[in-house]
Amino acid sequence: MITAGIDVGSVSTKVVLLMDDEIQYLVRPTGWSPRDAGLNTYKELLAAAGCKDSEVQCKVGTGYGRISLGFIDKAVTEIHCHARGAGYLAGRGGLVIDIGGQDSKAIVINDCGKVLDFAMNDKCAAGTGRFLQVIAAALGVDVSELGELARGRQPLEINSMCTVFAESEVISLLAKGEDKRDIIAGIHRSVARRVWGMASRFAPAGKVIFTGGVAKNRDVRERLALESGSEVIAPELGQLAGALGAALYARELAAKK
Amino acid sequence: MMRPQNMKIFDELRNLNVLTVQNAKREGKKVVGCYCTFTPQELILAAGAYPVTLCGTRQEPVAAAERDLPRNLCPLIKSSYGFAITGKCPYFEAADLLVAETTCDGKKKMYELMGKIKPMHVMKLPHSPKSEEALAAWTKEMHVLKDWLAEKFEVEITEEDIRKAIKLMNREREAMRRLHATTKVKPSPVSGVDLLVSVWTKGFNINKEDGIKLVEDLTAEIEEMAARGLSPFTSETPRILLTGCPVGFGSEKVVRLLEESGASVVAFENCSGYKSLDRLVDENPNKDVMTALAEKYLSIPCSCMSPNEGRLALIHKLAREYQVDAVVDLTWQACHTFNVEAFVIRDYVQNQLNLPYMHLETDYSESDVEQLRVRVQAFLELIQGE
């Protein structure tokens, strides 16, 4: 059986084809049109996998662009898709912390990937991937370099939670001659603290499963482990958790048909 | 979505209410504007004046209000003040006097500014619902308001006038209770948005007898729809109890989102809904009439009360009577009392009532609708075991 999960996030679009238990995937920038990004990334992956749309038995969409996708069978929220995907990747239940492009979420799941409770950040982008992008730009580095630059450095205190104010704070620290790497470490610690502030009420849920684009940043991972005092598992394909969860839902739906 | 025919009357009532209040003014009638369910409307009626709710549920005047008020203040306070200074609320314009209460800090301080625009009396509301001292102080406040109204309007307010007004207000409360109770039927014959709009519109209708009649007609029609098994929902539709900050037309986005996402909001525990209807004023002729008023109003379980156990009891009662599947707790940004109390409510709902609970914090603007939609949809998926 072949099913597809399409996760149109604010920054990147992730598509997963689930061919029995084999995972094929593709990640592309979302750009300004979530509808086109979803459809084009899906088509591109089909071509790469040598597979036709008619062979895909069910397609589930998720992410903020899910409502603009005309070609899917069903839209499911990213809360449930991320939970399902993260549970599958980690092979267990626990506390899923996902930090994406414009939001962060904490989701408690059981061993079947079923959602028991969840929390999401408020409307501002503080402590999300967008926040890291803005700071990286202010420091003249690429967001993918942040993790390695900050590892093992002494974090500086960053007090502002607001993205705009934090950027000003970073610029002031640079003006004072502080080391860029210590500033980044400080930013990472504030991201970890903020997300843990939201997730800590679910603390007894067990190990932390860290997903979303920001989970690729090793320094944030380590600082989240320090803040939470719990083991942090970051599955290698964590950025795909939403799309994979959607493809898993699609498989269930197809089986019911 | 299926709607009762009488809802059209309520839609038109919004324009009619303005004309009614303007006509009353032309006839030399007195109008008293109020904001909150703590205002003892009985005393205003007994003074021969019309009590009317003032505008404060829409986003439009918020920017104007931020000229004088801090941005980080609850949207209800900013909207109320913005309407007042921009002259966009016809009821505020028509009001001869304003009556308000020291419920929260934000309102209390805003009223100091508003009091410069129109003659205003602010009642000092004590915050302990069960103490004897608080009741005594609040009873005294009833006398102070009565004397202030008598002086301003140059009338004598007799005990008989007050007892008559109490009977009228109790009849209105009973009519409103029956309207709310129509949604106890499963599935509910009326949408939460329609119920909210009708209750909100009624607040601007100054003629109590007409208002009671309109509510009774609407109730009768909804009951009849229920008897015929008509409903915009199905027996599978998740039934929601809404608690937290007040909601009116223009700030109904969370109710709308819930119903657009496939839920039915059946119970409104908030003060724009059922909260102040649960208890009537004691009509016992042997009881001191001012104490009877004070007891009723002091028992309203608003989050400005401390501790506020009455709210837990009311949520419990409504959750059972309205057969709800989940509780949604709405906090307007910077409403500290409801925001802090959410911790207590979550614990109570999840662990004592064993129901799913979600707390949402937002303002009147549309800027976060899509983020809220994700949460609302995910919550409904959770309830339905997606």
Image: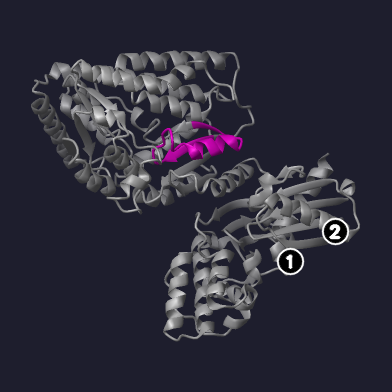
Residue nearest the observer in this picture, A57 or B180: A57
What residue is disc 2 on?
A21
Judged from the image, the secondary structure of the residue bearing numbered disc 1 is loop
Q: Amino acid at mark 2?
A: Asp
**Residue kind at label 1, given as amino acid type:** Leu
- Whole-percent x, y for residue B322 in the image: 50, 29
Nearer to me, B297 or B5: B5
Q: CA distance from mark 1 to mark 2?
A: 15 Å
Q: Is residue A91 visible?
A: no
Badge 2: residue crowd in 10 Å (few <14, some 14–19, many ≥20): few
Quadrant in the picture for residue B111? top left
The reply to whether the C-beta atoms of the residues labelled 1 and 2 are less than 8 Å apart is no
Task: Report helix, strand or loop for mark 2.
Answer: loop
Chain under callout 1: A
- In this rendering, the answer to whether A154 lies above or below A206 is below
Number of marks in the rendered image: 2
User: What's the magenta region?
Assistant: B240-266
Q: Are marks 1 and 2 on the same chain?
A: yes
- What label sits on residue A237 in the rendered view? 1
x, y percentage for residue B181?
Answer: 46, 23
Q: Position of residue A196 (x, y in %)?
A: 52, 65
- Residue A53: x, y in percent? 87, 48
Would residue B285 appear left or right of A106 to someone viewing this image? left
- Whether residue B277 is in magenta: the answer is no
